[in-house]
Image (cartoon, rainbow, N blue to C red):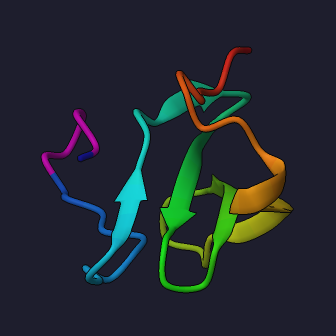
């Protein structure tokens, strides 16, 4: 949601077995961690409202410790 105008942004479509961490707002954009259990991937996205989300990094779930996985910045 964009607080100045009340406009709601939905950068991702709802999918089964896909989870998101808390978004982080930094450097005029939003950062999201996405866990896709069907594809076995963790993806870091950068999102600028009114643009397509950009993949910044991607890891295999098997290679990551998923306990307390979060963005710190």
Q: Is residue 42 left or right of residue 1?
A: right
Residue lying at the far left of the rendered structure: 6
Identify the residue at horizontal 24%, vertical 34% (top origin): 4
Numbered circles on residues, count: 0
| Chief SS of the magenta region | loop
Identify whether 47 is placed above or below 70.
Answer: below
* Highlighted magenta segment, given as a residue range: 2-6
Q: Is residue 6 left or right of residue 31?
A: left
Residue 58 pos. (x, y %):
82, 63
Q: Quadrant of residue 14?
A: bottom left
Residue 45 pos. (x, y %):
67, 58
Identify whether 68 is placed above or below 20.
Answer: above
Identify the residue at horizontal 32%, vertical 83% (top origin): 13
Instruction: Check the picture and name the quadrant holding the C terminus.
Output: top right
Identify the residue at horizontal 77%, vertical 44% (top origin): 64
Q: Is residue 49 left or right of residue 3?
A: right
Task: Please check the rendered image and state whether residue 43 is part of the magenta-colored stretch, yes or no.
Answer: no
Identify whether 39 is placed above or below 64.
Answer: below
Identify the residue at horizontal 22%, vertical 34% (top origin): 3
């Amino acid at each position: 949601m964009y607080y100045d105008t009340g406009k709601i942004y939905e950068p991702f479509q709802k999918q089964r077995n896909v989870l998101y961490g808390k978004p982080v707002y930094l450097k005029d954009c939003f950062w999201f961690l996405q866990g896709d259990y069907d594809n076995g991937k963790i993806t870091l996205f950068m999102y600028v409202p009114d643009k397509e989300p950009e993949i910044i990094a991607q890891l295999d779930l098997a290679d990551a410790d998923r306990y307390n996985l979060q963005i710190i910045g």
